[in-house]
Image: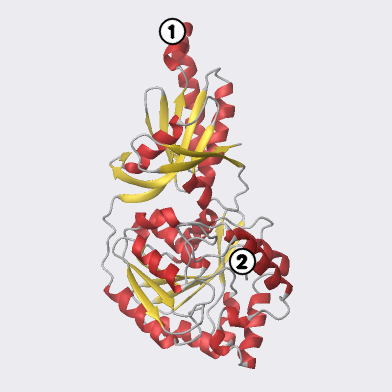
Amino acid sequence: MRPRIKYAQNGDVNIAYSVMGTGPVDLVMVPGWVSNIGLHDDHPTVARFFNELASFARVIQFDKRGTGLSDRPTAYATLEERVADLLAVLDAVGSVKVALFGWSEGGSMSILFAAMHPELTHCLITFGAFAKRLRSNKCPWAPTLEERDVDIKDFVRSWSSPRIEDYAASVASDAAAVDWFTRYLQGSASPAAAHQIHHTNTHINVCDVLPTIHVPTMIMHRTGDPDSTVEEGRWIADQIPGAGFRELPGEDHVPYFGDIDRVVSEVKAFVQTATDTSSSNRVLSTIVFVDIVQSTALASRLGDREWRQKWERFVELSQKHIAETGGRLVKHTGDGFLALYAGPANAVKSGLAFLALVEETELSIRTGIHTGEIEIIGEDIGGVGVHITARVMDAADTGEVVVSSTVKDITAGAGLNLEDIGERELKGVPGTWRLFRAL
């Protein structure tokens, strides 16, 4: 029996989802770049894969915004928005703790979700995942930008007859599988949408997120995966504290073709033996530091009373804005304040909004923003992420919002205008950090 398609709302966007099985663990299937959950039952092998998972878990499937049966806004979603969409689905199904199973680009999204919401994550499983789509010294296995552009153009040009061998080589000569796969991709996105999604995914980079994951994690990869190399899978596992690595034989990039019995067996064993770590007080968040520039000199010129009135007015305006945009004011820092946001795009937009708000008070500010690991200490926060953010702020001039490269990496596709201002040494922080000015 086909699972019923339902919809969860995140703002004005409807996210299609389905639920099957009644097991004791909620297993969320986070798909690759495109999907259409209404077509999974149209191929017997794919249907059996999901049915086998549903034999021991309550399986939650969904189509990310812009794909499949979900709404397709003009702008493609960022990882941050996709995480928020999944939260809406979990709320709709009444799930309070989930095992995440993300493949391909869904692995990148699952990595971010697990780091941002360890309290909701029972365990993390990735399959054929990538952390970064463009080659660098850290990721020499990834394609260059030029190679990626050529691949995207070729793939979209062949949308009438997509290359199944790039995703499921084991069934490339199976006419029924090729027919299903073609209908599946075409039912998941239009050619223009496919091009936009591929382009946005090119700039995904969750490398800096990996060490901040503190939930049980298993990284699975097939030896001959033509899309994401097994070397990257091993590297991802090495970066996540305590993560296990499972190398499986085969060349299929997607988990629902090839030796699906082995995949299901590995998932079942890991989900049923993973130890809950929800007591961890470490979480990935976006930290915003705002500082009044030359506050002492300004107070001396204006006098204590006028200075305090202007400062309190700015705080009042900022608090209202933070509350309206989903942030949290953590504390005042004498001549500024520290705020938290779940995701970096809203944080950057708020940093720019603070510049407009402060104009009303005749004060001047500078702002630093970083996405990193923090430690929750009651109502306060601490940890190296807070220290790094303070140093990023120190690099900002009057009237500037400066962000770390981690913020830029996670906000790919958000439409932010971030100007590269080069690499800097941050006092007390190892190495050099590439910083960007938000415009």
Question: In the image, is residue 431 above or below residue 366?
Answer: below
Q: Nearer the viewer, residue 384 or 65?
A: 384
Query: In the figure, residue 427 lies in which quadrant?
Result: top left
Q: Amino acid at mark 2?
A: Ser
Disc on res. 91: none
Task: Verify CB contact (< 8 Å) between mark 2 and mark 1.
Answer: no
Q: Position of residue 110 (x, y in %)?
A: 45, 63
Regarding residue 306, the answer to whether it shows in the image is yes
Q: Callout 1: helix, strand or loop?
A: helix
Circle 1 crowding by C-alpha within 10 Å: few under 14, some 14–19, many from 20:
few
Q: Position of residue 127 (x, y in %)?
A: 44, 73
Q: Which residue is mark 2?
A: 70
Residue at (71% x, 81% y) in the render = 161
Q: Which residue is mark 1?
A: 300
Q: Position of residue 414 (x, y in %)?
A: 59, 50
Q: Callout 2: helix, strand or loop?
A: loop
Q: Is residue 231 left or right of residue 4?
A: left
Image quarter (top left, top right, bottom left or bottom right) of the C terminus: top right
Q: Is residue 42 left or right of residue 155?
A: left
